[in-house]
Image (cartoon, rainbow, N blue to C red):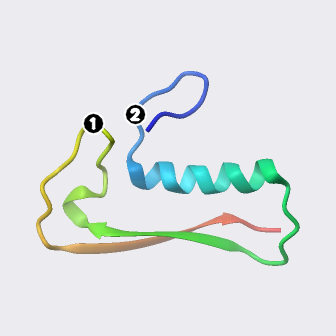
Amino acid sequence: MFFGQNPGQMAVEQAWFQAGTLGYQMSNPNYAGAIKFAVAGDSACSSDTLTNFSTPTGTWFYTSQQVYSH
């Protein structure tokens, strides 16, 4: 995935968190608490991009990150 004026490849996991952060910032919401996004997947694939991907190994990970806070 690509981001910004000078795009470079970004891992799908990081693009997901970045999209959540920017989406909530740009929409100027009025939610009362924090919003978290989460990602789960195979550990070998956690840094995959749309053009560079790994073979799954069967070991799983879960990561969550706050993308918005009022």
**Is residue 44 shown above or below 1?**
below
x, y percent for residue 5 = 61, 23
Left or right of 63, for residue 32: right
Q: Quadrant of the C terminus?
A: bottom right
Left or right of 66, for residue 60: left
**Which corner quadrant of the image does residue 31 belong to?**
bottom right
Distance in Å between CA atoms under marks 2 and 1: 9 Å
Residue marked by disc 2: 9
x, y percent for residue 46 = 30, 58
Q: Residue at x 13, y 72 (%)?
A: 58
Nearer to us in this view, 61 or 27: 27
Left or right of 53, for residue 46: right
Which amino acid, by three-letter code, is at mark 2?
A: Gln
Residue marked by disc 1: 51
Q: Circle 2 sits in a helix, a strand or a loop, which is it?
A: loop
Q: Circle 1 sits in a helix, a strand or a loop, which is it?
A: loop
Which amino acid, by three-letter code, is at mark 1?
A: Thr
Q: Quadrant of the N terminus?
A: top left
Q: Residue at x 54, y 56 (%)?
A: 17
User: Marks 2 and 1: CB-CB under 8 Å?
Assistant: yes
Crowd around label 1: few <14 · some 14–19 · many ≥20 (10 Å): few
